[in-house]
Image (cartoon, grey):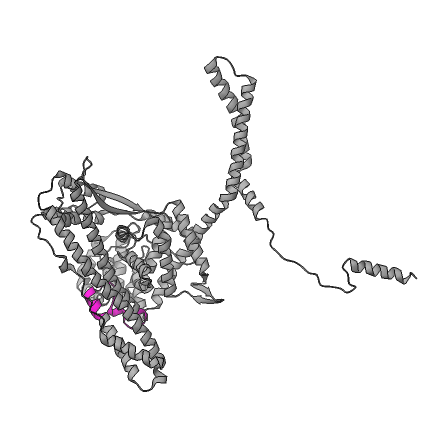
Amino acid sequence: MPPVTGIGQDVSWFRFMGWSGRPRENAVSLGRRDDERYQRWSRAVKRTRVSRNLLNIAWTAGPVTVLGLSGGYYIGYGRPPSLELVTYFVSFTVLSGLIGLVAKIVYDSIHGSAKEQARVDVMEAIDTLGDLILAVRDLAMEGLEPEVRRREAAVQLLQRVDLSPEGVAFACEELTGNPALGRWLAQIDTFRRAGLYSRIRDIHQEKGEEFEHIVADLRQIAPVAAGILRERYLGRAPRLQLGAPRDEFFLERVMAAIEQDNFLLMTTADVEAMLVLAFELINGREIPMLMFSYTGKWRLAGALDRMEAARSRYRIAQAAASNRIRALASWLVEADLLLYEAVPEGLSSHLLVERVVLALDTLAAQVDDLSRTGDMPKSRGDLLRLAEHLATALRLYRTAHEAFQEVGRVHAELLRASEAWEALTSRDLDASEQLRVGPGRRGLRIVEKVVSLDEEARESVCQHLVKYLHGEHLEKRGRRFFTRRDGRRRPLTLDGARQLAVEVALALEPHIGLSRPEVQRGVGATQASYLGNLEPGMSAQEKRILGEAMALEVEQDMSRAAERLALALVKHYRVRLTDAARHFLIETYGARPQVLGMISQSHVEEMPRISLLSLRPPLVPSPRRHWYRGLVRARRLLAD
């Protein structure tokens, strides 16, 4: 039997090696292998294609250098070069090529990964924006009444390019509730596809009176829908080349929401339009603009600049005032305080103001009635909700009221600038002051500009958006978008969508200048890319292909812009539209000859001066005192 001391020594040895005599659990330490630098260098070497570059260096330093040097030297000096000279040039070529190759690998290892990440960000932005456009469109529908949602969905269907005759019939029935009218429109669409327009005229003769009666009823509650239905009845279907209609002043509302830190100034339609604009610009859309400049007499040039600046401020002020009251009406609909049928799209500003004021009167009366009831504990929740609604509505109404007051101030500035221009141009204008299209440097010139994003700007915009989306933890689950806050997932709301539109505008502003009035007018005057083929579940690559194809399909129609430009020059600046100028506008921009003919026939000196006061937006009255009294009474009761 071996001695005990030996065993003790063996046990001590095992303890020294870390074994305690008892079985122990296997401990595994998990961590990430830190080989990012190696992977970056490896990707840089693969992108550089070292083997091909070495072959190029060998070919250049060998046969190319020897043949070039020998031939050139022999032609210049009449004898072949020495071995030392050939060795020098071959060595120089090899070393230069190797240094260039190493420099390329180093550059790719440092900046190549950034370019890779930029491309990934572009694809992620395109993918997310495409899904967000659909999500915001559906989110806007959710806030409507079932009947209104049914009608608005039908309008969206009727604007699809690829809608079948059966789809036209279904959408028409959803819109009007008249199956017979749906069958007529389906027949018209079938004949349109076959090019049988004579049969369409037969249907018009048979059903024209009944159709007009139905459309007249629809126009009372949905003027825009009635116009789209009439287009289908006339056999005119949407075309890819025409794009989709865009609200002229949506950018002004978005920028106003940023400036005043009040996101309620923009509607859900503005949010969708902002996302569509970013989507098409990222996918290569180029949006043209028409402006004019003057080169000539400095007094006339200065007066022209002041007049144009005053007109621009007045136009923006008018749009801002109208947009404020429309934003309030849209919010009242979202808060279920006003029916959508009462303030449909296309309603005149005069009726809009009347119905908004009536809705605020009703809301104030409800708050006042709840404040006077004695059963406060039961009505406290309703009173709190209505008081918050009234406070928000009053804030939006004050903004609209101040905007209309600003219109009056800017209008006075426009009148003063117009009077100065009239005094300066009371005489006949000479040739240098007319709209010239021939040679020369003096006179009025049409300036064409394009709103677009180059490669660097596109990457910068996408990186900005992706960073924001990651910061907001925006993620898609099924058909809905969610944001994550405090460890909890919440669905995307209208307020979140408005914040997203603002962030899109902030990303685009440094590159295209959305805050400039001329950019807002130029973008608002064009058609948006048709995105009706955008569907849930499409991959990022499919969305990119669709966006690029639709951006190329949209016609750059400058005819309306050219006609408006000609009208402004004749009407406001006393410029004669010569035959050469008309021909130039027709041939270059596709302006309609009959429209230009009517404009040119209105001789400047015989045209009466039109007071812009007659075109002033409707007067928005000051906030009524009983609105404030009801709100103050409710807040006192809630504070007790």
Residue at horizontal 40 percent and vertical 45 percent from the top? 456
| Quadrant housing residue 214 | bottom left
Residue at horizontal 10 percent and vertical 53 percent from the top? 609
Quick check: 43 left or right of 515?
right
Extreme-top residue of the structure: 78
> Magenta segment: does it hold 306?
no
Extreme-bottom residue of the structure: 374
Q: Nearer the viewer, residue 144 or 29?
A: 29
How far from the left and from the top, in percent, is residue 357?
22, 71
Residue 564 visible (yes or no): no
Extreme-right residue of the structure: 1
| Quadrant housing residue 364 | bottom left
Q: Nearer the viewer, residue 341 or 177?
A: 341
How far from the left and from the top, in percent, is residue 597?
13, 46
| 33 is higher (above) or lower (below) than 373 | above
How far from the left and from the top, in percent, is residue 72?
47, 18
Quick check: 551 left or right of 90?
left
| 268 is higher (above) or lower (below) than 284 | below
Q: Nearer the viewer, residue 574 or 13?
A: 13
Q: Total label count?
A: 0
> Magenta segment: does it hold 338?
yes
Residue at horizontal 19 percent and vertical 57 percent from the top? 410
Residue 15 visible (yes or no): yes
Which of the image's four quarters has the N terminus?
bottom right
How far from the left and from the top, in percent, is residue 340?
27, 69
The part of the chain drawn in magenta is 332-355
Quick check: 572 left or right of 85?
left
| 635 is higher (above) or lower (below) than 448 | below
